[in-house]
Image (cartoon, helix red, strand yellow):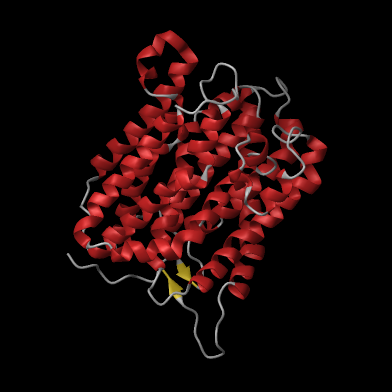
Amino acid sequence: MPRPPAPAKLPSLTVLRFPLATAVLLYHTALYFAGPVSTLTFMAYPLAFGAVSGFFVLSGFILTWVSTPQDRPRAFWRRRFWKVFPNHALTWTVAVVFFAHLLNPPLVEDSPPYASILGLLLLQNWVPSAEVFLAFNGPAWSLSCEVFFYALFPALIAAVRRLPARRLQPVWAATAAMVLLMPAAAACIPGPTLVPGIPLNEYSLWFVYVLPPVRLPEFLLGMLTARLLQTGDWPQLSRVTIAVAFAVAFAVAFAVAFAVAFGAACAAFMLLPFTYALGATFAVPFALVTARLARADLHGRTHQWVGPMSMKLGEASYALYLAHIPLLMVAAPVLAAKDAFAPWSGILLAATFVLAAQALALLLYRFYERPLMRAMARRRTPCSPPVSTPLGSGPREERP
């Protein structure tokens, strides 16, 4: 089946970023809140870990979709820099200079002096220490992976384009298998204990969750999914098939975590190591749903939940992802006050915080991120018009 003409936008993929970023926001809110709010929002943890995998898959998909043979590595890297670094530099500076040393949040008081420099340069993931790769603005660890992906992308896209169509599906399956086997490999790595009672050591966490080369197959899975859709070789999958894939991913994450929480009562689930609770099982379901949403957009069947407001929320998801931890640092003294709030008032406070974080993200996107992208990310000759991409006009490509 030939590839249909590409539209100016793939709006469903823009909107998809919002629930992914929100899942991360809810999980991190649970870590700061006390009482019933913490218990309620902590239930978002499987999707929060899986959302990061979803972002990596989505990143590979979009970058492959918008890439052309005429695109030069230097131009690509320039666009990526102006997409990623301004928001990161701003939120990292806020976290380090104004709040981290004043409020002394977890994983900051024990961080070595060089952690802030490595974090600013997005090199923190190459140090196997949680006091480094999770210090200060913790979510920035995923950007360290993305920077590694971007550095390799010009070579990767050339290799993917050279793959014959008949080999794309076997390579996709092999890449998916690699993603699913990484947690088993990580479980064999010895290291210092992170949290008593949880069978996950620091080096295993670093290897399977943080180390950029280990997360690269998820990015590749997105690239290969896009390429299969471009060649017309992506299979038509039903909603039931995709729902079952997500159900299995949730079941594995919950089962492994509950097996640890309840011990012998769930001993059967301990056949899988705890590293399978960190989201790797979500990579394949997110690849399936990304392809389905993109195909719907291509054929003019964009879902009804895609509208102007949901598009704005999706566009602001990168700002939300990076800004919510500094905002949590500010609110931490109130949020962590045990028994200070009745259950319903605590939930209302949590909802207020989530709305405040989203409002801040929209402001950052509207008045900081987007203007910088438009001004700096793409060089234009005086007579050249703006270039459209699948996620909108101008140089926007995707949320990192």
Is any atom of residue 19 visible in this view?
A: no
Can see residue 143? Answer: yes
For the residue pair 253 and 240, the one nearer the viewer reads as 253
Decide: is 236 above or below 334: below
At x 75%, y 40%, the residue is: 330
Residue at figure coordinates x 62%, y 63% from the top left: 369
Question: Does residue 35 sit above or below 227 in this rendering?
Answer: above
In the image, residue 183 lies at what x, y percent? Answer: 42, 33
Residue placed most toward the observer, 333 or 353: 333
| Nearer to the camera, 190 or 171 | 190
Residue found farthest to the left: 1
Compared with 283, 11 (above or below) is below
What is the x, y in percent for residue 75?
52, 73
| x and y, in percent, of residue 212 in the image | 51, 47
Q: Is residue 115 left or right of residue 10?
A: right
Extreme residue in the top direction: 264
Name the image quarter holding residue 223: bottom left
Residue most toward the bottom? 383
Q: Residue at x 49, y 84 (%)?
A: 385
Which of the 4 quarters of the picture holds residue 388? bottom left
Q: Pick the residue in front: 307 or 163.
A: 163
Would you say 91 lies left or right of 301 here?
A: right
Which residue is pictured at 60% across the width and 31% down the height? 30
